[in-house]
Image (cartoon, rainbow, N blue to C red):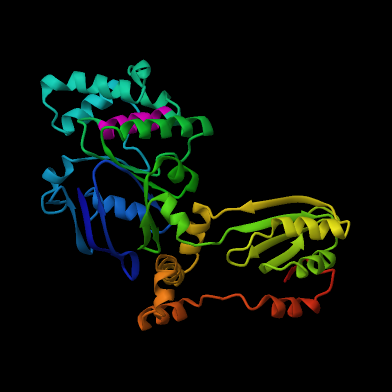
Amino acid sequence: MIEVRNLVKKYGNHLAVDHLDFTIEAGRIYGFLGPNGAGKSTTMNIMTGYLGATEGEVLIDGHDILKEPEEAKRHIGYLPEQPPLYMDMTVREYLKFAAELKKIPRAEREDAITEVEKMVRIKDVENRLIKNLSKGYRQRVGLAQAVLGFPEIIILDEPSVGLDPKQIIEFRELIRRLAKRHTVILSSHILAEVREVCDYILIISKGKLVASDTPENLEKMLGDTDTIEIEAKAPQALTKEILKTIPGIEQASVKASGEEGVAAAVIKEKKGEDVRESIFRAFAEKNVPLLTLQTRHVSLEDVFMELTQNETLPEAFRRKRYEKQENGAAAAAGNEMPAATEKEVSEAEIKVPAAVEAEWADAEGEGDDKNAGNL
């Protein structure tokens, strides 16, 4: 439905979009996720014909957005981050104006406007001036403009910016309803929003596409990286000593919890181990109360941070994904990673935890008055 090929956008020496390639298929809600300044809005503006690309092309249902703009734009409804509203018009007047611009046949306009007003729930304010509406209602009016004419693709750029929590929930529900009839592309830097409504996510960082998959698969890509978090009513030094006695711990860090006399630890288990019971027993034997013990699972936020915190991490991420996919079959056959992949891993500077005994030895010299220490 949408093909983005080798898309590049430069502003002087600044590379805002760096050779993007991806495809949008019909019938899904796509999340276009990235930190502020990643190139999301620039990409959205190019995809909708508001901005020209330096290189590459965008095809909408086979039509080049720059070479065949009228044909391509018939398939798109667009809500920019700042909705293009006319404050001195009523809602109904504005939608009539938008319908005329979209060349909706005159005989069909009134019914089309009424239908979208009902869909986005603005029928009750159709005769009010837009300038007198709340931010939430203005966003709905902007969405009604995008949906008007019922294009196959709805593109929403940061649609919940400035909305209060109640309005955000209502707007997410609107997006879900839209997805029953349209393909929706939602650009956002808000992780919870994307995780809540999207069934496929593209992550962009510094103008590059660094990952694309379902939310569930993205979370699995980090592999077995769940951790155990505890809080113990004990000094940090004693907490370290107790954890040193527990087999099955690969790595741990201990620091002050913020509560006086309480140490907090984040623990990574060795593969295939479950040390929760051992932790509980070890602290009980030393008469040290455990205030909390919980498993923290990998989240979309973890994936996002891993992918966007610097330029080389995407290569490390691909290595982790490769290892997860090839684990077992390659190991059984005695296969090695391809040389190119090994080079990528080296360039990505993946830090492999040292043996736990060595880490504990390093920690021995730390004073108890330090705020944090590695086991």
Q: Nearer the viewer, residue 285 or 109?
A: 285
Taking the image as shown, residue 319 lies to the left or right of residue 142, namely right
The C terminus: image quadrant: bottom right
Q: Is 140 a magenta residue?
A: yes
Q: Give the range drawn in magenta.
A: 137-147
Q: Which residue is drawn at 75% across and 80% down?
A: 361
Residue 314 in the image: state x and y as whole percent: 42, 68
In the image shown, does 77 or 277 lie closer to the viewer?
277
Q: Nearer the viewer, residue 186 or 238?
A: 238
Q: In this view, does 13 lie to the left or right of 253?
A: left
Can residue 257 be spotted in the picture?
no
Q: Does the magenta stretch include residue 141?
A: yes
Where on the picture, by quarter, is residue 160? top left
Query: Residue, x 53% and y 57% (percent of image)?
Result: 302
Residue appearing at x 13%, y 31% in the figure: 103
Magenta span: predominant SS is helix
Quarter-of-image position of residue 233: bottom right
Q: Where is residue 244 in the image (x, y as percent from the top left)?
A: 76, 70
Task: State the image coordinates of residue 234 (x, y, percent, origin top left).
Answer: 85, 59
Residue at the front extreme, as displayed: 332
Residue 244 visible to the viewer: yes
The quadrant where residue 56 appears? bottom left
104, 153: nearer the viewer: 153
